[in-house]
Amino acid sequence: MTAAGTAIGAVAEARTVPGALGVALRARRAEGAKLLVPYVTGGLSDDWTDVVAAVVAGGADAVEVGIPFSDPVMDGPTIQEASVRALDRGTTPASVLAELARVDAGVPLVAMTYYNLAFRMGDLRFARSLAAAGVAGAILPDLPLEESLAWEAQAAEAGVETVLLAAPVTPPDRLATIARRSRGFVYGVSRMGITGERASLAASAAVMARRLKAVTDTPVLIGFGISTPAQAVEVCAEADGVVVASALLRELLDGGGPQAAAEFVGRMRAALDAG
Amino acid sequence: MVEPGPDGRFGDFGGRFVPEALVPACLELEEAFRTAWADPAFRGELDALLRDYAGRPSPLTEAVNLSERLGVRVLLKRDELNHTGSHKINNVLGQALLSRRMGKRRLVAETGAGQHGVATATAAALFSFDCVIYMGAVDVERQALNVFRMNLLGAEVRPVATGSRTLKDAVNEAMRDWVSSVETTHFCLGSVMGPHPYPWMVRELQRVIGREAAEQCRRMLDGGLPDVVVACVGGGSNAAGIFAGFVDAPVRLVGVQPEGGAAIGRGVPGVVHGSASMLLQDEHGQVLEASSISAGLDYPGVGPEHAHLGAEGRAEYPSVTDAEVLEAFALLARTEGIIPALEPAHALAWVVREAGRSIPKGATVVVNLCGRGDKDVAQVATLLAEHAPPS
């Protein structure tokens, strides 16, 4: 092992507490808060780590950081555009993690990317590099139950919680398995489709939240198409919280910086706190 | 070439790397195909369509002039004579029947050269299905004739302007559509790629090429076998189909890749579009853009069973240059009066290069001529002018 590799391993052990994501989200839920997890594409701009800090200041309970991939098949036009912009800036998994390691977010960080980036580096090495950067959890939407066992074991070994996704078409037995194996939180997909802003909330969002809440005590967060504070409040009548991605990224792509991001998340936070 | 295990693996390759939202549809499709494939009524209906609509069996033609020229005996499996002009119709008719069986009356598909898009649009017209074809914006431009054909057949062609704007991005966009419409829509994937059961199912639907060719060889070669079977490989469906007829026999199997898209050889293992296979990618795992004069082979990955056959050493996957392809394209036209598509011109180019070298003089070679060149002539006219030696 190289000196750098040894250092990464040592940092991983020192900085990662098993279950940091789940522990933090459960604690917030116990306080009566609804959970708010904004998504920021890593490497989107020079000041992207300031955006991460800003959404925390705005009231995020955890931050999902996208590691851009060339072929994001679960993502709609907004996140695709953000991914392309980040990749065109020369962003790599290593650069995102190196920059993230310098951020003291104060809330858990969750990496979201596609499996090939982990596969290319090797599952354990990738998981350890996440942990070394202070990332507590990982979401890999193209790894369904049958394919994710090996990854989940390696991630757990590195102290990274793997968040699994459930979809509206997931049958009851699979849903229970997903809820049982998911760590940190369980991610309910609000509707059949890809990520992206929506004018109205799909009826399937509430159904998804209810179904998951019925089978697990793990925090249930709903994402895909949660664009406005009103939608977030509506979903949180059933769910423990929401993931907000495209609507926030749209602000950033249209020229908004850390301040705009903080305000966007602040509006969501205020609405959720007001219930 | 047998059925993969329940996890869809061919050795280290294959699998089902799809979002949870698509898992139930993949499981439903696997079950539907398994049941249909064992059902004599389904097989009978498909066979009748292949015979009476698509024009099968396709002939195995002795390429007398080319053989004399090369010093090896070349037999051409004429799948370019199928209705719609390529082998793609074999797969599409099967999937359309299956889609009807599953009660899904909308097809989405990706296309590169447009051959698979045309075949899918054709089947959709025949079955009165709605049809949306995703095609990279670059390919829409270089295959304008096929775009027009798809429109004539009643399909909607959606140009894909993201990424490399070729086949890879068309697959991404078709998958995004499918995630959003899976309850009413069948993804009519055109090659032996994607999540399980596609690589297995598409190979089985293309197996008819190999079954016919093996039978035709028995008759033409007095019960004997060819020495070599050659096909081009992008995703690799025509190669999988013809290899399936010879894989258990002592026959050399060769899948010819474009030099700018040689996933086996220049790629490393990766996961994209639903399966693990060999993949052109950078050191971080970002998928690279392939580059080939042939839109149908312009793909950075390859079907997982080919990756497996390559790893096992059962088949070999060399590559040829664009210049070699153009030469072979013109050679077949002049010697045999057959204008091949640029895709099978890759297979021919390898035979031309290797005749008398790794293919011994007098050996018998079956080439899968999987598509005709009508769609390519305008592009080739430009390219030949560029490649012409100064006069």
Image (spheres, coloured by chain):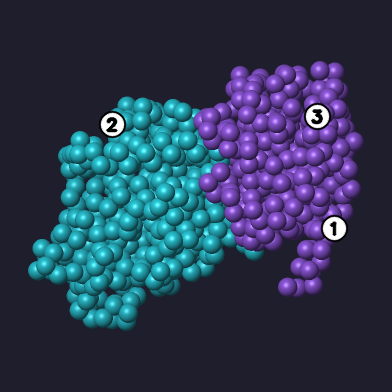
Chain colours: A purple, B cyan
Identify the chain of the residue marked 3, using the numbered disc in the image.
A
Identify the chain of the residue marked 2, using the numbered disc in the image.
B
Please tell me if label 2 and label 3 are on a single chain.
no
Classify residue B1 as left or right of residue A4: left
Q: Is residue A8 above or below residue B36?
A: below
Report the residue at 86% width, 27% height from top. A31
In the picture, residue B121 is in which quadrant? top left
Please tell me if label 3 and label 1 are on a single chain.
yes
Classify residue A274 as left or right of residue B43: right
Residue B264 visible in the shown view: yes
Report the residue at 83% width, 34% height from top. A27
**Residue wearing tag 1:** A14
Label for residue A29? 3
Q: Which of B333/A38 is in front?
A: A38
Q: Which of A58/B90 is in front?
A: A58
Q: Quadrant of the C terminus of chain A?
A: top right
Identify the chain of the residue marked 1, using the numbered disc in the image.
A
Q: Are marks 1 and 2 in contact (CB under 8 Å)?
A: no
